């Protein structure tokens, strides 16, 4: 007989304590991109519901997670032009790796900007509007 498996779709994790635990665990493993994605999904999911204290805490932590992810990207040098026509596979791979890192950094800046704006709208705090302005500038510069 043929067994049919249905894939179960679980909602994103939005519990603050679970997110904090995952954050610590994944930081130890150095998986900032995974953390960025987890928090991004949680904030997207929570943004569709009424703002709660948990939502605000998750937004703040998401901003922190995205900053940590960006800081890991910022150590990478910029794209360089090949010297005297030297375009080896190794050179191309190094440039591709840098480009992917720059793309990830742009994504993190975009997420910081989005979370800051959601936080500012929910709290009306001047500090959160400042975060939004700063992250908007960083995002624009990263493009």
Image (spheres, rainbow, N blue to C red):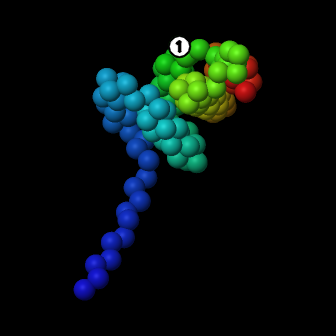
Q: Residue at x 43, y 33 (%)?
A: 35
Q: In which quarter of the image is the C terminus?
A: top right
Query: Does residue 46 show up?
Result: no
Q: Residue at x 56, y 30 (%)?
A: 89
Query: Does residue 114 show up?
Result: yes
Callout 1: helix, strand or loop? loop
Q: Where is residue 132 in the image (x, y as percent from the top left)?
A: 68, 23
Residue where numbered disc 1 is placed: 75
Q: Tell me if 5 is positioned left or right of 44 in this view.
A: left
Within the image, what quadrant is residue 130 found in? top right
**Quick one: which residue is furthest to the left in this view?**
1
**Number of callouts:** 1
Mark 1 is surrounded, within 10 Å at the Cα level, by few (under 14), some (14 to 19) or many (20 or more) other residues, namely few
**Quick one: which residue is furthest to the bottom in this view?**
1
Q: Tell me if 42 is positioned left or right of 124 in this view.
A: left
Of residues 89 and 14, the one nearer the viewer is 89
Q: Position of residue 55 (x, y in %)?
A: 50, 36
Q: Which residue is drawn at 42% across and 41% down?
A: 14
Image vertical order of residue 11 relative to residue 84, above or below: below
Q: Which residue is drawn at 38% across and 65% down?
A: 7
Q: In which quarter of the image is the N terminus?
A: bottom left
Q: Tell me if 129 is positioned left or right of 40 in this view.
A: right
Of residues 37 and 53, the one nearer the viewer is 37
Q: Where is residue 123 in the image (x, y as percent from the top left)?
A: 61, 27
Q: Where is residue 108 in the image (x, y as percent from the top left)?
A: 58, 29
Image vertical order of residue 51 relative to residue 61, above or below: below
């Amino acid at each position: 007989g043929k067994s049919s498996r249905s894939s179960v779709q679980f909602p994103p994790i939005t519990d603050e304590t679970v997110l904090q635990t995952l954050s610590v665990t994944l930081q130890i493993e150095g998986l900032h991109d995974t953390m960025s994605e987890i928090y991004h999904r949680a904030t997207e999911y929570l943004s569709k519901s009424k703002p709660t204290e948990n939502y605000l805490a998750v937004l703040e932590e998401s901003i922190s997670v995205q900053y940590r992810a960006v800081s890991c990207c910022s150590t990478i040098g910029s794209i360089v032009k090949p010297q005297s026509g030297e375009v080896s596979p190794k050179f191309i791979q190094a440039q591709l790796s840098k480009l992917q890192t720059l793309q990830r950094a742009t994504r993190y800046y975009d997420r910081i900007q989005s979370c800051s704006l959601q936080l500012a709208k929910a709290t009306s705090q001047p500090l959160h509007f400042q975060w939004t302005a700063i992250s908007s500038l960083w995002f624009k510069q990263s493009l």
